[in-house]
Amino acid sequence: MAVGEFELIQKYFARSELTAPEGKASPVALGIGDDCALLDIPSGMQLAQSMDTLVEGVHFPKNAPPFALGYRALAVNLSDLAAMGAEPHSFTLGLTLPDVSPEWLASFSDGLACLAKQFKIALIGGDTTRGPLTITIQAQGLIPTGKAMLRSRAQPGDLICVTGTLGDAAGALPAVLKGECPESASNIHVRQLLNRYWYPTPRILEGQWLRRKGATAALDISDGILGDLRHILKASDVGAEIDPSLVPISPALKRTFHPAAALKTALTGGDDYELCFTIPRDLAMTLPPEINDDCKITCIGQVTSESGALRDSRGRLITAKAYTHF
């Protein structure tokens, strides 16, 4: 028997793991089931919103594992909240399906629920329709009024830092396009890269920590550090000098690619979802080398007053570009 839209929503997405996170007072006055959701915003807080759309054949390959797809779709939105220093609040889901597969839907919603439970974020509504597989998520977060980390606040003399390691997800892309997943990869290093692609870590707690520590500007690295850093330079009307040799590269990437290829991947590859941030030098000196056991901080350069110019440590202009959607 065919499953209708409302039955689909009720069975796979109106489940408590997604709509009522454990260990957190509900931030939602009214969730799934009405024409609109109603949100209560605490006094002294601002609501941050981010939306991402993932299209089959553009952002992920055909026949991608549905659990990993659900996890990744929510993770990339949470990463945007992390870049602002926000606490996750709620999210909506727009899902376009070529057909209704109970097995696919169960696994996809399990992937969503896995990450939603981890960060205690509630699914509050959305829409389903028929068409080419497309996933759109809009995530909301809360930030103390006026305290968000913006791209436009970098100042000359600030240090430029990144979290984690870069290039792993892009390094996994050849295996992803072959249909490999972490569970099927025979090479341990490729498996580690695939895990970084399918299961990125939104730096939510790290973003809030950096906001409190005085980071001036931040963004998440989705299209490659060289391209994304330029967004900060443009918004802040500043330049930058970086030392590419300082960009953190994981052992897995180093063992999968030749050194030059590994560095190029780390500089221009997308889908890392680590944070790039700027911070005054005196405050940077007080930061520990690691935010936690899973996330180290690496300084790769400094902000300069040369508007729009991105140079290496020898003063040469860096012209390499990163991923662009059009």
Image: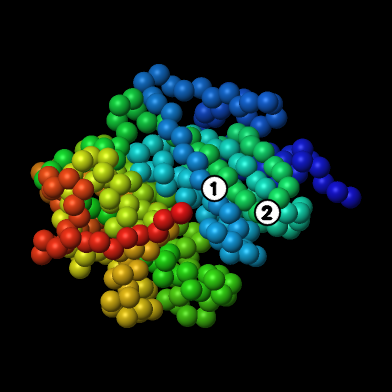
Q: Which mark is residue 53?
A: 1
- Dot 1: element: strand
> Residue placed at 40% from the left, 19% from the top?
43
Q: Is residue 23 above or below residue 101?
A: above
Location of residue 54 in the rendering, given as x and y in whole percent from the top left corner:
55, 52
> Along the line of sight, which residue is nearer the eye, 259 or 38?
259
Residue at the limit of the structure toward the front, as seen here: 326
**Residue 76: image location, x then y, percent:** 47, 50
Mark 2 Cα-neighbour bin, 10 Å: few <14, some 14–19, many ≥20:
some
Q: Which residue is mark 2?
A: 132
Q: Residue at x 45, y 75 (%)?
A: 190
Callout 2 amino acid: Pro
Q: Is residue 316 left or right of residue 199?
A: left
Q: Position of residue 274 (x, y in %)?
A: 35, 54
The alpha-carbon separation of the residues under discs 2 and 1 comes to: 13 Å
Horizontal side, residue 264 vs residue 106: left or right: left
Amino acid carrying label 1: it is: Thr
Q: Nearer the viewer, residue 89 or 265?
A: 265
Q: Image height check: is 30 above or below 159?
A: above
Q: Residue at x 68, y 26 (%)?
A: 35
The circle drawn on residue 298 is none
Q: Earlier in the sequence, mark 2 or mark 1?
A: 1
Q: Secondary structure at mark 2?
A: loop
Any part of residue 300 in sight: yes
Where does the image place residue 109, in percent across and percent down from the top left?
64, 50
